[in-house]
Image (tube, rainbow, N blue to C red):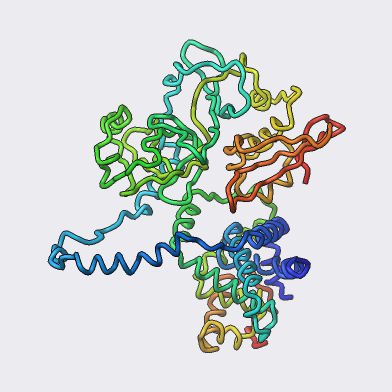
Amino acid sequence: MSDFKRKLDQMMGDTTKQERRIKQGVHERLRKPAKTFSWQVLFVTVAIPVVALFLILTIDPTNYLSSDKGPGVPYDPLVDLAQISALQKKKQLSAIDYEEFAALPHFDQVDGLYYVDQETFSLNGSSDAMHTVIERKSNLFDEVVYEAGDIVRTMTNTTSHLPTYMDAYYEVIAVPGDRVVLKKGQLKINGKPLQSELMDHYEKQGITIAGGYDQLLNAREYFLLNHFPASKTVQGATITPVHKIYGQVVGLATEERTLSMYMDYLSEQLTGNYTPEQYFDLYVYDDLLGFGNLSKTPAFTEISRLGELFVEASYRKTVPISDNEVEIRYQYGREGVADRVFTMKRDAGSDRWVIAQ
Amino acid sequence: MNNINQIIDEHSRYLVRIAYLYVKNWSTAEDIVQEVFVSYFQKSDQFRNEASLKTYLTKITANRAKDYLRSWKHKKDVLFDTIFVTAKGAEEVVLEQERLVLLEKNLFQLPLKYREPLLLYYYDEQSIAEIANYLQLNENTVKTRLRRAKQQLKGFFEEEDWEVESH
């Protein structure tokens, strides 16, 4: 082996984790069932010649002489992406006004599908350390769970369109089934220009909406805009899949008065007697949103969709195996979507529940 | 299943490193290698044993990595990297690590047309003739590109590595 090859190997370091994930991924992919016969495909195949014949008989070729027709120049997200990302990097994308949350209900207890955001703030006239309370939705894959006007939190960096950021609050602008048309900053939902307080705010503050869509939102897509945009900025109007939305802002919690394992975690006083499911949530929370205070969970290093496990909490069940062992089962009830099972064991030394390998 | 595990265990380390040397992103490198294995196991009857399995898988990995570098997704990722990635401060790393960080930085600054012959020659240990055949270039062009690549990285080569020789 040449010295240079040795240096390259040192440069790349230990790749055991990558190798383990590759192996697991290959096995998962190979386990997927083979495609089955689809009557829809047969129907479409038969229908194509009929439709083609119909079009040939009815099309007026003179319609195609107009120079106004054609696909036009599509919107290129890369143009705005750099500007939006640069603003975010300099923390100039959002100007969060926490006072707007003052009217939200106070939660004495935060548990179940609710969790607290890790960011602390204070409100005028109160010395309490506040956090927003976020609700993870149940049945998020089976129903329309957010409405226009809801304020939500997202996971960072959607994989298409323009980016969303974890430290921004987004407003739901359009929901599944809505047709969104955005062209040169003009936003129309279902054919009408959008009129809302947020749009007025955008106009008054000289904020540009970036994006270019003419799209019917599918059953799992929502259209989001920054709810607290800084003035004179460019904001990405983003079509976001529902599993990338952490949940809706529904209330406030205080470190002083709210009972919650999340509060215990954030104040580094994890002394409560929590259930295995609570511990499971806490491990995911620590990994995704928290401060990495808990010991790393080896089972998580092989999971690329950890965020979804957090968001999809309503799809799981806890199945007791023994006094010291339970299973956390994610069951989606859809063909082709594999269930995921985690085993949790009670650690005899600390009496905490930990996720077994 | 044992056969699958054996092939993955035998080749994944090498392939993920080859993929990384092309794409400079571990997660993308993992995806590429995963795709290579899945495709191989689904169509392994098409593998005709003309080359060793390692050579075959390496070639497929390199091809997929280059497909990725040409894709729109890659261009977007590069933009994110440029904006978000900040280098670690010099005080954070010990001298040797600092050199490796510098090597990585310099290596990925090389255009692919220089980096590819370099990694095929020094990492995959192919001969000049094999590289020329794979890249559809003549051998002198490969030698020239190798020399230029090494000039850019000259601080990282030992004396004995300097002579470009045919294996």
Res A224 visible: yes
Residue at the far right in the pictured view: A348
Instruction: List x then y, in percent, for residue B38.
Output: 63, 67
Q: Quarter of the image for the C terminus of chain B: give it.
A: bottom right
Q: How many marks?
A: 0
Q: Residue at x 56, y 79 (%)?
A: B146
Q: Quarter of the image for the N terminus of chain B: give it.
A: bottom right
Taking A321 as reference, is B39 above or below it? below
Q: Is residue B78 left or right of residue A214?
A: right
Q: Is residue B131 left or right of residue A104?
A: right
**On the image, which quarter does residue A149 sit in?**
top left
A205 or A38, which lies in front?
A38
Q: Residue at x 35, y 66 (%)?
A: A48
Instruction: List x then y, in percent, for residue B71.
Output: 46, 64
Q: Is residue A276 left or right of residue A191?
A: right
A173 or A292, which lies in front?
A173
Instruction: List x then y, in percent, for residue A43.
Output: 41, 62
Instruction: List x then y, in percent, for residue B126.
Output: 65, 82
Res A12 visible: no
Taking A88 as reference, is A33 above or below it? below
Q: Is residue B105 left or right of residue B48?
A: left
A82 or A193, which lies in front?
A193
**On the image, which quarter does residue B24 sit in?**
bottom right
